[in-house]
Amino acid sequence: MGIRTALTLVSSLAFISYGIYCLVSPAMEREFVRYGLPRLRVLTGCLELLGGVGLIVGLWFPLSFWVSTGGLSLLMLCGVYTRFSIGDPIHMWFPALLLLGLNAYLFVDSLRNRT
């Protein structure tokens, strides 16, 4: 297994896990209220799930990979902005920053290599 595949699987599992957690966890309901975005919780969870599955599908279909890595990068950019705008300490931004960096790297790498 190559490094790109391994990173893709890590990202995919993270987003599938976070997506499910976002949809079913009362703690995430409270977090989205704290963010001032309670109406976006279900959409966010669904986008995370779709993106995570899209990454796996993208191992065979490049368009799915590009859309998923690009979309998840944008979603995490919004997550970082949300954390910043509500005044969370920087250590609470770490998961979103890490996943933003990982998916942005995968997106750019896939465009460079056209695979």
Image (cartoon, rainbow, N blue to C red):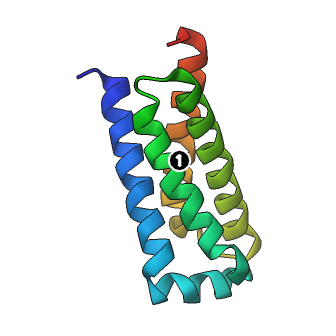
| Residue 115 screen position, x and y as percent | 49, 13
The residue that mark 1 highlights is 51
Q: Is residue 18 above or below residue 89?
A: above
In which image quadrant can residue 73 be found? top right
Q: Is residue 109 above or below residue 71?
A: above
Residue found 65% across the figure and 43% down from its top: 71
Residue most extreme to the top? 113
Residue found 69% across the figure and 73% down from its top: 40
| Residue 45 screen position, x and y as percent | 55, 66
Q: Residue 22 versus residue 35: which sits nearer the camera?
A: 22
| Residue 48 screen position, x and y as percent | 53, 57
SS of the residue under disc 1: helix
If the image is split into quadrants, where does the N terminus sit?
top left
Residue found 34% across the figure and 39% down from its top: 9
What amino acid does circle 1 point to? Gly
Query: Left or right: 74 with respect to 103?
Result: right
Query: Left or right: 107 with respect to 27?
Result: right
Residue found 37% across the figure and 35% down from its top: 7
